């Protein structure tokens, strides 16, 4: 997300940093470029105007222009105003603090990902907030909509309201609240029907459901890829139904980010969650300050650490740490590291959270660092025998040809993987001198993930990410 905006702003700020002193004309020129970058990212014009005016009023002040690092001061001002535009410091949590069962009404257009997001939110409330959740589909128009939520409920192991053919949405909602009370549920998620566009029938139906259930939260599920259309839909739902928050879906596919930057400014509603992928656990809190850091190329190390803490198998990490302490690191361990990386969001997902990586985006693209690369390397290791994985030194030419044929790659790719493993093994031996605590402090993940298969020997700067 925000790749295009981040790239444009990065080039503007690089020029600012190189100048020892700034004039008012320099600031105005930089802000003109920021304005164009925001508009190209599909940010709403009123939001852009307010943003630029607020930054300019402070940036041309004497305390900035006469400071020791005026360029850095302007960048800080832009960062602070980005945080403010996105909603201020800290994430706004889903409010379930009320007498159970607490109703949460999910609204939005058809195709915005509302039903999948309902299941994601149910899973999140169950696992993170330890709530007993019941889901109910109120969509009687879209074919198999109720069955879709039922299947997602089975996948997430979350209860869904039994389907009664012929019932209308308001009656289903009332039945869901009754079932919630009788079943001892903490939260009832109501997945309302959508339309291809906002119409009077849709609004009247949702208002009737709202009045019948008195939801604690009314969340608009909006597709980030629709840009300004998402903002217009949010405005209409806010005026007719009333919204307590927004969930942005398909964030991972949105290179511009205009919807996220516009939503708060236009509607005044906080963005509470964002969908970062197709899996049911791919739903994250929306932290304005972290998102601002990603936009400006500062990375989001806090989210990276949180993601690692949630996905790393501590026992596996302990096993690898023990092997490293003995100077051992075989191909089974390397495969485990690849799987761990994919669980954390893949290479592109992780790189997006690291500071400074935007500056070497072209190098990353040329190196072919993506999800396919990880899967291909896992396939190469899977084509080896257990003996070969434990003893890679025995893999000679004939074995390489067999492994390449079995995994659908070239012998050169097998060689690259073996070279990468050798470099990592050497690095692990050096790390073993730090002791087990030194390895565990890194979460068991391989720092840098460089190697011959990722942009040449040593990867970026000799095996690590650029500073």
Image: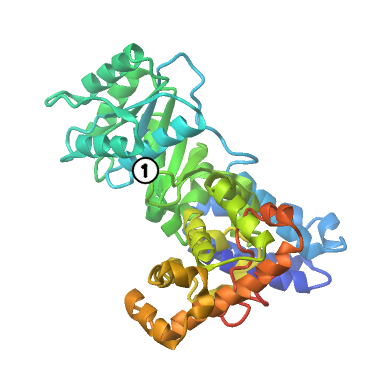
Q: 206 above or below 464?
A: above
Q: Residue furthest bottom?
A: 397
Regarding residue 33, the answer to whether it shows in the image is: no
Q: Quadrant of the C terminus?
A: bottom right
Residue 100 is left or right of residue 149, and the answer is right
Residue 351 is left or right of residue 467, and the answer is left
Q: 27 above or below 114?
A: below
| Foreground residue among 138 and 67 | 138
| Foreground residue among 400 and 9 | 400
Q: Position of residue 107 (x, y in %)?
A: 34, 35
| Foreground residue among 319 and 460 | 319
What colouring style does the render use?
A: rainbow
| Foreground residue among 167 and 349 | 349
What residue is disc 1 on? 233
Regarding residue 35, the answer to whether it shows in the image is: yes
Label 1 sits on a secondary structure element that is helix
Q: Position of residue 196 (x, y in %)?
A: 24, 46
Q: Position of residue 401 (x, y in %)?
A: 38, 84
- Which residue is depicted at the point 38% across and 78% down? 403
């Amino acid at each position: 997300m925000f790749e295009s905006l981040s790239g444009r702003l990065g080039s503007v700020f690089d020029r600012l940093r190189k100048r020892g002193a700034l004039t008012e004309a320099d600031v105005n020129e930089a802000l003109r470029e920021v304005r164009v970058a925001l508009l190209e990212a599909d940010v709403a014009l009123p939001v852009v105007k307010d943003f630029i005016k607020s930054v300019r009023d402070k940036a041309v002040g004497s305390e900035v222009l006469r400071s020791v690092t005026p360029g850095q001061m302007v960048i800080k001002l832009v960062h602070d105003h980005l945080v403010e535009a996105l909603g201020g410091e800290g994430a706004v949590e889903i409010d379930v603090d009320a007498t159970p069962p607490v109703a949460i009404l999910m609204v939005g257009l058809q195709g915005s990902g509302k039903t999948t997001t309902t299941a994601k939110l149910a899973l999140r409330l169950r696992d993170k907030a330890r709530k007993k959740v019941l889901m109910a589909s109120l969509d009687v128009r879209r074919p198999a909509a109720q069955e879709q939520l039922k299947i997602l409920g089975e996948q997430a192991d979350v209860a869904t309201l039994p389907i009664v053919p012929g019932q209308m949405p308001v009656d289903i909602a009332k039945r869901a609240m009754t079932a919630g009370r009788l079943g001892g549920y903490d939260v009832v998620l109501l997945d309302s029907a959508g339309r291809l566009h906002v119409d009077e029938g849709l609004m009247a139906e949702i208002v009737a459901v709202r009045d019948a259930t008195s939801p604690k939260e009314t969340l608009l599920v909006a597709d980030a890829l629709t840009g300004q259309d998402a903002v217009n839909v949010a405005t209409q739902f806010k005026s007719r139904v009333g919204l307590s928050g927004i969930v942005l879906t398909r964030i991972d596919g949105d290179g511009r980010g205009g919807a996220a930057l516009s939503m708060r400014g236009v509607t005044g509603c906080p963005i509470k969650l964002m969908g970062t992928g197709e899996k049911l656990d791919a739903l994250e809190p929306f932290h304005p300050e972290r998102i601002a850091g990603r936009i400006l190329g500062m990375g989001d190390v806090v989210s990276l650490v949180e993601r690692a803490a949630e996905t790393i198998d501590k026992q596996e990490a302990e096993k690898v740490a023990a092997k490293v302490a003995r100077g051992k690191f075989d191909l089974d361990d390397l495969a485990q590291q690849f799987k761990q990386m994919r669980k954390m969001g893949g290479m592109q997902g992780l790189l997006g959270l690291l500071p400074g990586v935007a500056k070497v985006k072209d190098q990353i693209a040329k190196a072919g660092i993506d999800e396919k690369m990880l899967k291909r390397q896992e396939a190469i290791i899977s084509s080896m025998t257990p003996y070969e994985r434990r003893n890679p030194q025995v893999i000679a030419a004939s074995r390489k040809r067999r492994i390449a044929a079995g995994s659908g790659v070239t012998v050169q790719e097998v060689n690259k993987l073996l070279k990468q493993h050798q470099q990592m093994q050497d690095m692990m031996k050096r790390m073993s001198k730090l002791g087990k605590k030194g390895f565990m402090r890194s979460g068991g993940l391989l720092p840098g993930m460089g190697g011959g298969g990722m942009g040449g020997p040593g990867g970026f700067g000799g095996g690590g990410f650029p500073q």
